[in-house]
């Protein structure tokens, strides 16, 4: 469980590291990707409670609306938990295509909540992290699988 927590802390660090202005809008959804991996690989260890806690930490660290990431990450991890057996057997390319749907749902829910709170960003810029997240998904998947096997996490 320590290795899982360390990977979540690494994802949190990647969420808050400063990036140049134009690249900031394309930051991958690190926390969502790490949670998706662990929910697919170890659904009995990482569930909606872990997603909620990780989301609250992300909200606090990024200064966003409290509960925004918590709600969206809970929704995505909940869907992953329902489909984890089917997702695990798919090749990485097919997983990435399905992650487009899940991450878009995460971003659109966040877009809707921010709009309701009076902070409406542009939708095109708001969906850009989905594209970059899909590009880094194979690296996240292979890296975390290596961690899981190296430390024999079950």
Image: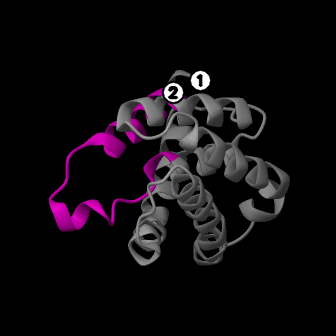
Relative to 31, is 51 above or below? above
Q: CA distance from mark 1 to mark 2?
A: 6 Å
User: Which sits in the foreground, 17 or 110?
Assistant: 110
Magenta region, residue range: 3-31
Q: Residue 22 colored magenta? A: yes
Q: Are marks 1 and 2 in contact (CB under 8 Å)?
A: yes
| Residue 47 in view (yes/no) | no
Please give the residue where the numbered disc 2 appears in the rendered image. 5
- Element marked by disc 2: helix
Position of the N terminus, as image quadrant, is: top right
- Element marked by disc 1: loop
Q: Which mark is residue 1?
A: 1
Question: Which residue is at 38% across, 72% downward?
Answer: 125
Q: Residue 24 colored magenta? A: yes
- Quadrant for residue 128, please give it: bottom left
Q: Position of residue 109 (x, y in %)?
A: 62, 58
Residue at the top extreme, as displayed: 2
Question: Which residue is at 44% across, 55% downward?
Answer: 119
Relative to 74, is 105 above or below? below
Question: Which residue is at 40% across, 37% downward?
Answer: 12
- Please rate how many residues cluster around mark 1, counting C-alpha atoms within 10 Å: few if below 14, some from 14 to 19, many from 20: few
Question: Which residue is at 60% across, 50% downward?
Answer: 37
How many numbered marks, from 0 up?
Answer: 2
Q: Position of residue 99 (x, y in %)?
A: 62, 67
């Amino acid at each position: 469980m320590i290795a899982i927590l360390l990977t979540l802390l690494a994802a949190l660090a990647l969420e808050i590291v400063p990036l140049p202005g134009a690249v900031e809008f394309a930051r991958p959804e690190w926390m969502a990707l790490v949670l998706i991996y662990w929910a697919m690989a170890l659904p009995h260890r990482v569930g909606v409670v872990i997603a909620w806690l990780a989301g609250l930490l992300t909200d606090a660290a990024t200064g966003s609306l409290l509960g925004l990431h918590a709600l969206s990450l809970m929704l995505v991890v909940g869907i992953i938990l329902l489909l984890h057996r089917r997702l695990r057997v798919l090749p990485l390319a097919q997983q990435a295509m399905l992650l487009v749907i899940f991450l878009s749902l995460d971003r659109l829910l966040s877009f809707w909540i921010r709009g309701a709170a009076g902070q409406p960003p542009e939708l095109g810029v708001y969906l850009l992290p989905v594209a970059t997240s899909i590009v880094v998904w194979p690296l996240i998947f292979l890296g975390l699988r290596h961690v899981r096997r190296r430390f024999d996490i079950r």
